Image (cartoon, grey):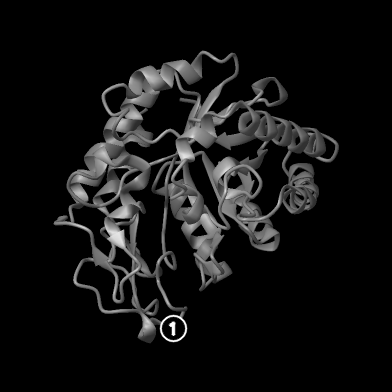
């Protein structure tokens, strides 16, 4: 694999909640140094809504010698609002590219058929996922035509402002015209019903005529999470207070680490150009009802169980780690598994 990377959240936003409520630039800079030096990455996919945060993190990453995949995400907005946002993002990305030629790639979006308005009924992504006729809507030729036209529009608008390479982080049921992009980007998790056919899925994307980058894949931290793939987070029922598990799930770092090693092995065997493991750290996602640690609910399960992160974030954030005493997290077994794979491949 040419690109050995990890996803890094600078502050995705869903339902009015920022997934990175506490954002300390010095902590981000240190994280990115560890991503390069200890995780042995040569690339990073920076995700989030704030263009200022994305730009700052990008500069930190470029300082470390990382290739930046600049991935701005505006969720649950109209196509026109999303387009306006991308135009601003492309200008920011071009400024970064000017300072680091050949080391910045721009993603024009991520899974927008689900995370954007205008294609599937629902005010937010959760409502769209729960839409009773979701499968029929996704198969509707008019849905795919509207989506395909919109993604092509975003690519054209980005090309007018950004002179580097482009991609889009797609999901399996999106039909993208890849001739407009430099990389085929796909969020390729493994899970049922594709678990045993995952190599076939990878080969299909790798045959599309452009270098394939697996822009997002991972596994939650419990036994059996590998069979759920990208929907491992659904084991928690957030409609109850405090949140509770929907079944009997056991926290297991080894299970997560083993699955990530298997996924990296399968991706490399399929000839994937690059991989971005999801994700380095998760802090605020699901930490309702706000950013105050004293208001976080007392759970009857390990809060790290439904997380994809390679490190275990501490609450309150003032606590420091053992492996790296200057950060508010501790590497999980999956961190060491990914580091070992990237170091030796």
**In the picture, which quadrant includes the C terminus?**
top left
Look at 47% across and 48% down and name the residue there: 131
Q: Is residue 212 above or below residue 86?
A: above
Image x and y of residue 70, in percent: 64, 46
- The quarter of the displayed image where residue 294 is located: bottom left
Image x and y of residue 140, in percent: 57, 29
Image x and y of residue 65, in percent: 58, 44
Q: Nearer the viewer, residue 86 or 40?
A: 86
Report whether 131 appears left or right of 96.
left
Q: Is residue 28 above or below residue 342?
A: below
State the SS at label 1: loop
Report whether 312 appears left or right of 19.
left
Report whether 231 appears left or right of 92.
left
Q: Is residue 164 visible?
A: no
Q: Nearer the viewer, residue 128 or 182?
A: 128
Q: Is residue 194 visible?
A: yes
Q: Is residue 217 above or below residue 323?
A: above
Q: Which residue is mark 1?
A: 292
Q: Nearer the viewer, residue 225 or 266?
A: 225
Q: What is the number of callouts on the image?
A: 1
Look at 71% across and 52% down and name the residue there: 78
Look at 57% across and 44% down and name the residue there: 120
Image x and y of residue 285, in percent: 43, 64
Report whether 260 appears left or right of 124.
left
**In the picture, which quadrant includes the N terminus?**
top left
Q: Residue furthest bottom?
A: 294
- The quarter of the displayed image where residue 297 is located: bottom left
């Amino acid at each position: 694999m040419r690109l050995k990377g990890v996803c890094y959240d600078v502050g995705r936003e869903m339902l009015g909640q920022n997934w990175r409520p506490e954002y300390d630039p010095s902590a981000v800079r240190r994280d990115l140094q560890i991503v390069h030096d200890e995780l042995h990455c040569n690339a990073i996919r920076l995700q989030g809504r704030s263009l200022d945060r994305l730009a700052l993190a990008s500069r930190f990453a470029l300082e470390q010698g990382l290739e930046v995949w600049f991935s701005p995400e505006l969720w649950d907005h109209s196509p026109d609002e999303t387009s306006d946002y991308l135009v601003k993002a492309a200008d920011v990305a071009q400024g970064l590219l000017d300072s680091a030629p050949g080391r910045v790639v721009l993603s024009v979006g991520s899974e927008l058929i689900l995370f954007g308005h205008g294609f599937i009924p629902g005010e937010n992504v959760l409502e769209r996922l729960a839409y009773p006729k979701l499968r029929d809507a996704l198969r509707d030729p008019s849905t795919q035509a509207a989506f395909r036209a919109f993604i092509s529009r975003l690519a054209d608008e980005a090309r007018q402002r950004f002179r580097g390479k482009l991609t889009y982080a797609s999901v399996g049921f999106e039909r993208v015209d890849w001739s407009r992009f430099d990389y085929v980007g796909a969020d390729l998790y493994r899970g049922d019903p594709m678990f045993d056919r995952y190599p076939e899925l990878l080969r299909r994307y790798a045959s599309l005529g452009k270098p394939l980058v697996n822009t997002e894949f991972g596994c939650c931290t419990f036994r059996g999470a590998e069979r759920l793939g990208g929907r491992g987070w659904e084991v928690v029922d957030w409609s109850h207070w405090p949140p509770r598990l929907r079944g009997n799930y056991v926290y297991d770092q080894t299970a997560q680490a083993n699955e990530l090693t298997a996924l990296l092995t399968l991706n490399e065997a399929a000839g994937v150009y690059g991989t971005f493991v999801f994700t380095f750290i998760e802090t605020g996602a699901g930490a309702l009802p706000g950013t105050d640690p004293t208001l976080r609910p007392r759970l009857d399960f390990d809060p790290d169980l439904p997380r994809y992160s390679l490190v275990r974030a501490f609450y309150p954030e003032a606590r420091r780690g053992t492996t790296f005493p200057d950060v508010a997290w501790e590497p999980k077994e999956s961190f060491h598994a990914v580091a070992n794979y990237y170091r030796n491949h």
